[in-house]
Image (tube, rainbow, N blue to C red):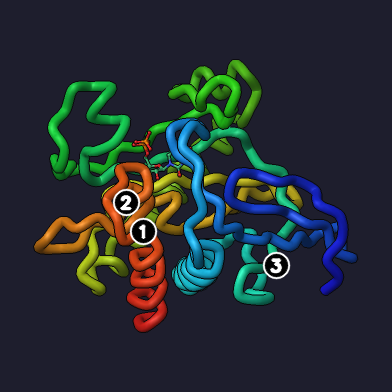
Amino acid sequence: MEKGKVLYEGKAKILYQTDDPDLLLQYFKDDATAFDGIKKGTIVGKGVANNKISCNLFDLLKQHGIDSHFVRKLSDNEMLVKNVSIIPVEVVVRNISTGSLCKRYGLDEGIVFETPIVELYYKDDALHDPLMNDDHVMAMELATREELAIMREQALKINKILQEFFDSIDIKLVDFKLEFGRFKERIILADEISPDTCRFWEKGTNRKLDKDRFRQDLGDVEKTYNEMMNRIGRKL
Ligand code: UDP
């Protein structure tokens, strides 16, 4: 697969064109940012870990009938993906309270929700990704009601599949963020699923196994990404 021009460079990934207009190469960087880009750093090996973890989890979801932009792994840092048009609405699913939810609503950390909370955020760095509801999404013509219904339904299905998988490797899936895109009249899952976009707590100890180690300077950052890659890879 020919690696063409850079189509888009984000904080953690680069999308390259390929010789097929329907396909892109998604490259995972070691760069890490937090708090709206204020905190910057490098996590050695993060690109390799996030690529492998995302490939594994997209494969798992496919086995359960969830289609995504993932086509195949190309190298340690690269996967081939479908050239979707990203819907600028981030879908966050929360099983346990933490992060911005606790800050916004004054909740204690660690409340286990009986029903998962689905939140929508406007994907716009300059506006700091504000929280939004269905009416905002429709008024701003970011997605139709039908598209939103698909995104919600898929997000909840994905939550069930991932919760069950992580439970089997003694990890609690606390929360995560998904992005969807349009591809040939369909809505499919896109972006990545990794410790950059999910929160994972170890069962029993509640040890944090995700990007919070970088955000909160908890140490063992590189080691944790590597550990997650191995724990997931051993099972899948
Ligand atoms: N998240 C993400 N990208 C974002 C914002 C959040 O991947 O731009 C993920 C984050 O890793 C966590 C979940 O979405 O798994 C919920 O994040 P939260 O709103 O608590 O954000 P934070 O505490 O990082 O501000």
Label 2 environment density (alpha carbons within 10 Å; few <14, some 14–19, many ≥20): some
Distance CA(mark 3)–CA(mark 1) = 27 Å
User: What residue do we see at 63% from left, 38% from top?
Assistant: 87
Disc 3 target residue? 80
Residue 203 x/y as whole percent: 15, 63
- The image shows residue 70 at horizontal and vertical percentages of 62, 65
Q: Earlier in the sequence, mark 1 or mark 2?
A: 2
The kind of residue on which mark 1 rests is Val
Q: Is residue 25 left or right of residue 90?
A: right
Above or below, 171 against 174 in this view is below
Q: Are marks 1 and 2 in contact (CB under 8 Å)?
A: yes
Q: Secondary structure at mark 1?
A: helix
Query: Label for residue 213?
Result: 2
| Circle nearer the N terminus (2, 3) | 3
Give residue 50's position: percent from left, percent from top. Answer: 50, 63
**Is residue 89 at all visible to an observer of this figure?**
yes
